[in-house]
């Protein structure tokens, strides 16, 4: 917490922020202001709620501190910046940015918020370093009153998910984050502005695209769909490579690459991945400021799974999706503190002394480090009276909420119906 202490002017929010992050790292089942306040020994959740809503501190400045700390530990000039979005399922219509939209979290259209994230992946580890909340155009950006009620700043307008990714990548590179590559799925690979930005900065990319993408072949004289091009590749044109370890072993695929440069001095390729069992294909547009071997492109493409694993770890280990805030400020503050908690685990895993003499012992994982933290560092013992006080507080608040809900339902049922 000393890394970010200077961002909190007053002692109370500074102390509460430390307790908040400890709570996110703790074994508390749901990481809400209520449960975190109970664990911290508070009599009610007001201090935790103030921290997220009205306390004076800059979440973007804390995010920058988290990013700088991670880069000190994980930084490498050939690291990969990975961008992707994740959904946060919500009830109701008041949470900022919420609407019915497709989210991979549920695998279908659901009432949800969507956050776009930027991850940093190097040989030393991987972590989230930035975040943006996606605001749908019609249901939010075109409704000024709704933006005002949610506390969205006046200078925030509609931006597509690739545009949010471009903002985060530019901010990271402008801050001196060392990276040689960027990767992302089809949503980001389809954006020509993102590819142009990276080429201008001489940052290589391996970006997924759809099967209907057309690329130049035959020295730029012919445009052809990538799926048609894949059908023309002979059996000898496919090479087996692993794009990294997975939960069930190496991710082995067959790969092919085809030069799509239109000038002799360009280093531009189409990379094609084929599943060895199902034959399913995936396509990537690739560019590099210098010649690189196929294995390098394969490794970068495989880095994209890292951010999905980070989403899973963030939600499972530090409650990335446990927040109960509705406004713009609260969302960014909660997500930033969750990123800080995840950074603690990531850096401990990256810097822990791993035994070289125990071949049957795997390296410390983020989940195992969190268990050890809770056993040896974060363990708390609260008196029974405190637990009973919180039981009464919760049930009183829930009864009050239930009465209000019933009153609204009765008023709605009693209102005259217009036929």
Image (cartoon, rainbow, N blue to C red):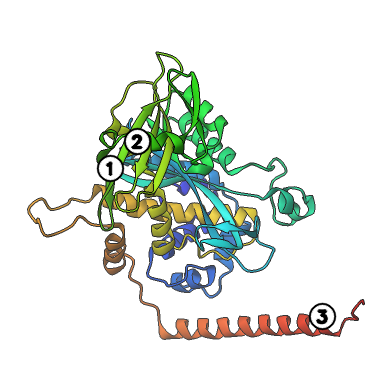
Q: Would residue 311 appear left or right of 48 to someone viewing this image?
A: left
Confirm whether residue 233 shows in the render: yes
Residue visible at 51% across and 68% down in the picture: 32
Residue visible at 28% across and 60% down in the picture: 369
Distance (Cα) linking label 3 and label 2 = 57 Å
Q: Nearer the viewer, mark 1 or mark 2?
A: 2
Q: Nearer the viewer, mark 3 or mark 1?
A: 3
The residue that label 2 is drawn on is 79
Front-lying residue, 214 or 98: 214
- Secondary structure of residue under mark 3: helix
Residue 112 in the image: above or below residue 44 = above
Report which quarter residue 74 is drawn in: top left
The residue that label 1 is drawn on is 124
Looking at the picture, how far across and down is residue 278, in whole percent? 34, 53
- Secondary structure of residue under mark 1: loop
Distance (Cα) linking label 3 and label 1 = 58 Å
The quadrant of the picture occupied by the C terminus is bottom right
Report which quarter residue 181 is drawn in: top left
Residue 19 in the image: above or below residue 135 = below
Q: Residues within 10 Å of mark 3 (few under 14, many from 20)?
A: few
Q: Which of disc 1 and disc 3 is earlier in sequence?
A: 1
Q: Residue furthest left?
A: 357
Q: Residues within 10 Å of mark 2 (few under 14, many from 20)?
A: many
Looking at the picture, how far across and down is residue 398, in whole percent? 61, 82
Q: Which of disc 2 and disc 1 is earlier in sequence?
A: 2
């Amino acid at each position: 917490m000393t890394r970010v202490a200077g961002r909190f002017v007053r002692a109370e929010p500074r102390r509460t922020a430390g307790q908040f992050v400890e709570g996110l790292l703790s074994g508390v089942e749901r990481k809400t202001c209520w449960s975190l306040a109970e664990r911290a020994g508070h009599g009610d959740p007001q201090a935790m709620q103030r921290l997220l809503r009205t306390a004076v501190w800059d979440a973007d400045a804390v995010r920058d501190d988290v990013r700088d700390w991670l880069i000190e530990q994980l930084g490498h000039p050939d690291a990969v910046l990975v961008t992707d979005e994740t959904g946060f399922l919500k009830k109701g219509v008041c949470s900022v940015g919420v609407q019915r939209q497709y989210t991979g979290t549920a695998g279908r259209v659901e009432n949800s918020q969507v956050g776009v994230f930027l991850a940093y992946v190097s040989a030393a580890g991987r972590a989230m370093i930035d975040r943006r909340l996606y605001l749908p155009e019609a249901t939010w950006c075109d409704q000024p009153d709704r933006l005002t009620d949610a506390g969205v700043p006046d200078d925030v307008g509609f931006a597509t998910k690739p545009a949010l990714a471009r903002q985060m990548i530019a901010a990271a590179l402008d801050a001196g984050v060392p990276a040689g590559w960027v990767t992302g799925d089809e949503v980001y690979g389809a954006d020509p502005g993102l590819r142009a930005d990276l080429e201008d900065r001489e940052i290589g990319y391996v970006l997924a695209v759809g099967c209907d993408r057309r690329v130049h072949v035959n020295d730029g004289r012919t445009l052809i769909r990538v799926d048609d091009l894949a059908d023309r590749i002979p059996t000898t044109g496919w090479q087996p490579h692993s794009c990294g370890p997975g939960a069930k072993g190496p991710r082995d695929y067959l790969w092919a690459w085809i030069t799509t440069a239109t000038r002799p001095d360009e280093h531009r390729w189409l990379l094609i991945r084929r599943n060895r069992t199902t034959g399913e294909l995936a396509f990537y547009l690739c560019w590099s400021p210098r010649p690189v071997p196929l294995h390098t492109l394969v490794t970068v493409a495989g880095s994209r799974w890292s951010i999905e694993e980070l989403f899973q770890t963030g939600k499972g280990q530090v409650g990335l999706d446990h927040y109960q805030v509705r406004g713009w400020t609260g969302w960014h503050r909660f997500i930033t503190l969750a990123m800080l908690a995840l950074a603690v685990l990531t850096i401990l895993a990256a810097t822990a002394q791993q035994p070289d003499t125990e071949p049957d012992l795997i390296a410390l994982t983020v989940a195992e480090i969190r268990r050890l933290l809770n056993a040896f560092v974060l363990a708390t013992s609260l008196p029974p009276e405190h637990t009973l006080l919180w039981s009464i507080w919760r049930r009183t608040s829930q009864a009050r909420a239930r009465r209000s809900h019933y009153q609204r339902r009765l008023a709605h049922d009693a209102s005259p119906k217009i036929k």
